[in-house]
Image (cartoon, rainbow, N blue to C red):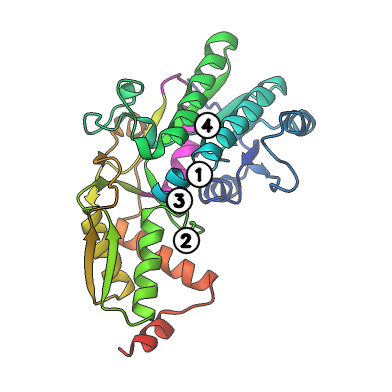
């Protein structure tokens, strides 16, 4: 097939301040590519006219569409309208504008939540649109599914070399730790850190603790994204994960240990669990020679350290508050 992305290339990373976009931008720069970025105040990607003018003027060789409204169960359940409408507007703005500007390569980042709630495990890419979605994130998932179909349509009608990647649950430096909108792993880091800081002897978590989740460090995802830009050209989305999962209860115990919380962990079963299990079949991406490098415990520890540093905190200060 040959290399589908020249080196050096000019790549526009949409969403460069987010967890995924920042990691992809770092990786592209380290590989010698020129990365083009715009902040939200400089370019609102929901504005199709402004986005088209920007891409027409900059004419990048490739676009990585990592910009999206994202969040955990609470945020998805509380704000379903922006989760579907903002994401649809971004996709309907960026993808047509990229094609009109002559962009040769585009990578659309989706999510593992696009798959049916009770999909057979591990989940193959072919499971898309074969069953009902998880109700708690249906608006977001439907927007992402629309993006996949949009990319496929550009491939089939115009022959565009545009592709889609479906990451599993992601975490890493720069993650969102806001208690109202964060995903489960950074939310747990913050909960256990604050419990340790405040000397609490118990942390109560949502759900039963039995759902199983797969987690991938965002730097590993960035590595996979660059590999796909260089080597993959097909209308089938590509799952990107580590191929292993664990229960939320096991994840909580591991994070509590890493953070240094010594109290009890209990679960409020009146709260929703979400999808019972989401383990991706990653044989398609590993066939390209990619595999993750960062073990989960090592990644959690480095993510915790990065958050402490970014917020001006330290492990020693947190321990002294508890008196250990």
Which residue ends up furthest to the front in the rendered image?
Answer: 270
Image position of 305 with respect to 35: above or below: below
Mark 2 vs mark 4, foreground winner is 2
- Side of 105 where 119 appears, left or right: left
Q: Label 3: few (<14), some or many (≥20) within 10 Å?
A: many
Q: Tag 4 or tag 3, which sits nearer the N-term?
A: 4
Report helix, strand or loop for mark 3: helix
Q: CA distance from mark 2 to mark 4?
A: 24 Å
Asked whether 99 or 3 is in front, the reply is 99
The magenta segment is: 216-236
Q: Secondary structure at mark 2?
A: loop
Q: Which residue is mark 4?
A: 108
Q: Element type at marker 1?
A: loop
Name the disc covering residue 127, or none. none
Task: Answer whether labels 1 and 2 touch (C-beta < 8 Å).
Answer: no
Label 1, label 4: how far apart the Cα atoms are: 23 Å
Circles 2 and 4: CB distance less than 8 Å? no
* SS at badge 4: strand
Q: Quadrant of residue 13?
A: top right
Residue holding disc 2:
177
Does the image show residue 116? yes
Look at mark 1 in the image and give the residue it sits on.
79
Q: Residue at x 37, y 33 (%)?
A: 239
The alpha-carbon separation of the residues under discs 3 and 4 comes to: 17 Å
Pinpoint residue 280: horizontal percent, then vertical percent: 29, 36
Q: Do callouts 2 and 3 mark residues in contact (Cβ within 8 Å)?
A: no
x, y percent for residue 264: 21, 72
Of labels 1 and 4, the one closer to you: 1
Location of mark 3 (residue):
219
């Amino acid at each position: 097939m040959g290399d589908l992305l020249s080196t050096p290339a000019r790549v526009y990373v949409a969403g460069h301040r987010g967890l995924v976009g920042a990691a992809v931008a770092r990786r592209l720069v380290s590989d010698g590519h020129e990365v083009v970025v715009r902040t939200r105040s400089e370019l609102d990607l929901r504005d199709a006219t402004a986005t088209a003018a920007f891409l027409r003027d900059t004419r990048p060789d490739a676009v990585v569409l990592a910009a999206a409204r994202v969040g955990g169960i609470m945020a998805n359940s509380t704000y379903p309208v922006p989760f579907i409408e903002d994401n649809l507007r971004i996709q309907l703005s960026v993808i047509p504008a990229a094609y009109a500007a002559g962009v040769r390569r585009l990578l659309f980042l989706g999510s593992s939540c696009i798959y049916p709630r009770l999909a057979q495990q591990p989940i193959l890419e072919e499971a898309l649109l074969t069953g009902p979605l998880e109700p708690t994130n249906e608006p977001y998932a439907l927007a992402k599914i629309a993006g996949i179909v949009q990319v496929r349509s550009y491939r089939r009608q115009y022959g565009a070399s545009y592709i889609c990647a479906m990451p599993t649950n992601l975490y890493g430096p720069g993650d969102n730790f806001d208690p109202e909108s964060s995903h489960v792993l950074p939310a747990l880091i913050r909960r256990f850190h604050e419990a340790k800081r405040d000397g609490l002897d118990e942390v109560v978590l949502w759900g039963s603790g039995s759902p199983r989740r797969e987690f991938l460090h965002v730097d590993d995802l960035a590595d996979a994204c660059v590999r796909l830009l260089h080597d993959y050209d097909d209308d089938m989305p590509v799952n990107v994960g580590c191929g292993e999962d664990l229960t939320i209860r096991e994840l909580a115990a591991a994070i509590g240990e890493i953070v240094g919380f010594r109290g009890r962990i209990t679960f409020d079963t009146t709260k929703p669990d979400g999808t019972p299990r989401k383990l991706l079949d990653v044989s398609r991406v590993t066939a390209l020679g990619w595999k993750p490098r960062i073990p989960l415990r090592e990644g959690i520890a480095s993510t915790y350290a990065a958050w402490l540093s970014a917020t001006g905190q330290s492990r020693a200060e947190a321990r002294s508050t508890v008196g250990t």
